[in-house]
Image (tube, helix red, strand yellow):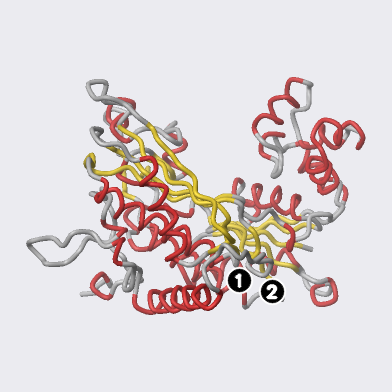
Amino acid sequence: MYALVDCDNCYVSCERVFNPALEGKAVVVLSNNDGCVVARSPEAKAMGIPEGLPFYQLPTRFPGKEIHALSSNYTLYGDMSARVMSILRASAPDIFIYSIDEAFLTLPESKYIDIDVKAWGEALAAKVRRWTGMPVSIGIAPTKTLAKVASKFAKRYPGYHKCCVIDNEERRQKALALFPIGDVWGIGHRSALRLEAAGIHTALDFTHLDATTVQRAMTVTGLRTWQELHGRDCISLDHLPRKQTICTSRSFPKMLTTRDELAVALSSFAARCAFKLRQQHSMAQYVTAFISTNPFRDDLEQSCLAHSVALPAPASSDPEIVGAALSALDACFRQGFRWKRAGVVVSGIVPDDELQTSFLDIPAELKKKFMEMSAAADEINRHHGDESLQLASAMHTPDPATGKATTFRNSILHARRSPFYTTDIRDIIEVL
């Protein structure tokens, strides 16, 4: 059996933990630079606020409505996620963290055959809520895909008390008959449209197709989803898709014109990509940098440029990834434009234990030192806060008023951002 634990409306829930006045209110969380809506409370969804709506359109699209809009605070969200995951680790023999707000727990029959898994799931959801303030929904089933289906029901219907179990044929049939084909994990938007055009509207309709038809139309990936919906466990947790590309990009609060200004931003972006590579124990073979102007400024000359650098051998250290990103910037930068957005993409990702060396690469001893230096920086930043230690090329110009350089997380517009309640001692809540 598998339990899929899903944090309900994760970003909004993190905000509500420290600001209970937001409970029951329409709340939206905005993207970087307060651009678009990226997360919505159930009340905001019921109001009809769509995901991706530009922030500036909220007052005109929903006049007179009370909507609480907050800048994204990924430091807070990441820390709250880590607290939830620590509770889950102590509650099951094995855990696979699928995303910032989802994790699969394995429940071996030898240990859980004699307990009521429904009661166990309800108790776990209650524990997470009591210890962290975060609401979670839990779906339990014999396959990962059915567990995802069950978690959706646990989230949508209060009668499940935050835990839905699909553990027999009758429950499987009823659940799939009510589950839209477009919501099935593993079926993309285009596939869903094709299936609906063919009269396949629910997950149960999909299971009525024969295996040959499914594989011909949707390859082996679609066939695995079909088998999982039939209750056959065939997607190994160890072989869930590894990210094939990692991207960090931002729009700038003001437009940039010089190469040096862009270099500082791209160094920060590349360092973030390198950190994410190390987190998932992987390395990248290609680094791409891109820069673009503001497409909404018709009065300005437009341009969007990119360049990719192939590394001699896969890498994940800060000096190697940042160095490649700056080389890519030098290859694509053009004077005379006002740049509004930039980003770094790392691709050709491979596990870090499958490194194929190259005589064109930097010396092995230097590569080892780069990796050790990056690992040490990760550890220091983990203990003392993000960007306590960073590469000089990623340092912003010091503020004349304070003498301190702007950090990566403060280099974007965040006029509505909540405090860093759990990671900055200056933002700890005071109880009077």
Q: Does residue 138 appear in the picture of this structure?
A: yes
Q: Secondary structure at mark 2?
A: loop
User: Which residue, given by chain and number where applicable, does mark 1 sit on?
Assistant: 88
Q: Amino acid at mark 1?
A: Leu
Seen in the picture, residue 341 relative to 239 is either above or below; the reply is above
**For mark 2, what is the residue?**
92
Depth order, front residue of 274/66: 274
Q: Quadrant of residue 283?
A: bottom right
Q: Amino acid at mark 2?
A: Ala
Residue at 28% of width from left, 32% of height from top? 56
* Horizontal arrangement in the rendering, residue 321 relative to residue 301 (left or right): right
Q: Image height check: is 294 above or below 93?
A: above
Kindly identify the residue that appears in the image at 34 percent across and 63 percent down: 18
Quarter of the rendering containing residue 409: bottom left
Q: Residue 86, image x and y in percent? A: 55, 74
Cα distance in 3D space between marks 1 and 2: 7 Å
Mark 2: few, some, or many residues within 10 Å (few <14, many ≥20)? some
With 113 as the anchor, is 261 left or right in this view? left
Q: Quadrant of the N terminus?
A: bottom right
> Which is more toward the observer, 158 or 201?
201
Q: Position of residue 65 (x, y in %)?
A: 30, 33
Quadrant (top left, top right, bottom left, bottom right) of the C terminus: bottom left
Asked if residue 246 can be seen in this view, the reply is no
Residue 131 placement (x, y as % from top left)? 48, 73
* Contact between labelled residues 2 and 1, with CB atoms less than 8 Å apart: yes
Judged from this view, the residue extending furthest toward the front is: 359
